[in-house]
Amino acid sequence: QQFTQALLQLYNRSYFLSVPGHDQSSTLAQHSVELTLPNHHPFHRDLLRYAKLMEWLKSTDYGKYEGLTKNYMDYLSRLYEREIKDFFEVAKIKMTGTTKESKKFGQRRLSLMGLHGSSGKLTGSTSSLNKLSVQSSGNRRSQSSSLLDMGNMSASDLDVADRTKFDKIFEQVLSELEPLCLAEQDFISKFFKLQQHQSMPGTMAEAEDLDGGTLSRQHNCGTPLPVSSEKDMIRQMMIKIFRCIEPELNNLIALGDKIDSFNSLYMLVKMSHHVWTAQNVDPASFLSTTLGNVLVTVKRNFDKCISNQIRQMEEVKISKKSKVGILPFVAEFEEFAGLAESIFKNAERRGDLDKAYTKLIRGVFVNVEKVANESQKTPRDVVMMENFHHIFATLSRLKISCLEAEKKEAKQKYTDHLQSYVIYSLGQPLEKLNHFFDGVEARVAQGIREEEVSYQLAFNKQELRKVIKEYPGKEVKKGLDNLYKKVDKHLCEEENLLQVVWHSMQDEFIRQYKHFEGLIARCYPGSGVTMEFTIQDILDYCSSIAQSH
């Protein structure tokens, strides 16, 4: 009994003296500012010298062994809570880009020094997300030139560099937590003689009471100790020691999502990879379970990000006084897809992204058409043509395999509405000539032979010459110039389709011209009647007009 009591005092003193940071000269602040967690290896190394004695105590006086275990958990849970909360506080400051980080953290550390008194009673940090005073809007941008309204944070602050910074910080947090948990679990197994992977001979079975954290014992001399109960004991000790990790991770995730909802893409990929790695080591470990729980939150945020984008598509309002151009949600889909492709490259969660793409692209298609139907300033065909051209260009550039069908559909819609707009806008630039030849074709349809149409009084050679003289080259060029100005007013500069549309109009005009030439050749053979301008003139007019604007 005396030896056991002396051993207890030795252990308790060793716990306290070995705890990193029990002294006020701790370098914890330095570790935190650098976004690293203190290394507990010296602490573990010192205590492992007593592992054999702990094994002896476990087999001879389980009550005392249990008491030491509880003391260890109490000391370590308070220590880790302080270290981890400090660590996460700095991560939050770095994520929000708060200025004078080290000064602010240094001031905060002064208030924490009282926690390291000689009594050894540690209390946790009182860090709060509210201290960060981050303001953000839940709505994405309403203009294609900006990403989202973040209150006092400008859109320029939310560029690729900022997201890359967030990604690095989040990865650093996970990379620091993993070895910390694994090292502690390995130490617990070795020091308290608890098996993680295989059975070993024993004289008792330990189990963790679900409600209180006290260890109970059943003596079974000579029977092997079940692996599951020892693994469960390790897991329950880890849960108590690292009870602050899961809520701190969830707070960090909430902050990342608040800063920019697209951060959920980074978090989903990073967290999934770390869960996959942890589960390959031990699917039932504390680390696997905790990261798995947090992954559920990350996936929920990712799904919410997708749902919010679709909702914002449905709620978009366009100005009745200005041309539509590229819709905000079309530009945002391009941004989302470009970011997602860079993040999800070779990622385990590619299937989640593909499902999100399918939902988003259908929402984009439906709502482009909805806006086009409601547009008053910009013709419906222009809204459809410009936006589906943008979608097609985006999908062609990114080569998203699951959206191949949608890429073809976008191209078809762009082509169809380009043609429709050209035909509608160009109309019949030689209107009286069109009307004249409509009459000619009507007579032919009634059974009059083409070469006999010229004998009809209303459609003889003199009437044809009279109509042709109303369209000299100068007037044709003037009409084309007015048409160019009208098209220029309809189209937006950012999509740069003006020359494409103009070239299509040129082709359509030449097609009409050739149609008239063909009718003249068939219905007025040998008459010598020709148009006042040539195809080459049309090409020259169109080129000159395009260059002059």
Image: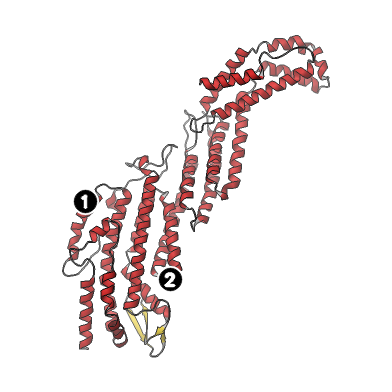
Secondary structure at badge 1 equals helix
Front in this rendered view, residue 194 or 69: 194
Residue 244 place in picture, x, y as percent: 32, 64
The reply to whether dot 2 and dot 1 touch (C-beta < 8 Å) is no
* Amino acid on which disc 1 is placed: Lys
Task: Identify the image quadrant of residue 199.
Answer: bottom left
Residue at 19% x, 70% y is 120
Q: How far separated are the C-alphas under marks 2 and 1? A: 41 Å
Toward the left, the furthest residue is: 118
- Tell me the residue that label 1 is attached to: 103
CA neighbours of label 1 inside 10 A, class few (<14), some (14 to 19), many (20+) = few
Residue 91 place in picture, x, y as percent: 31, 55
In this picture, residue 300 sits left or right of residue 113: right
Front in this rendered view, residue 54 or 433: 54
- Tell me the residue that label 2 is attached to: 284
Quadrant placement of the N terminus:
bottom left
Q: Can residue 482 be seen in this view?
A: no
* Amino acid on which disc 2 is placed: Ala
Secondary structure at badge 2 equals loop
Residue 79 place in picture, x, y as percent: 26, 67
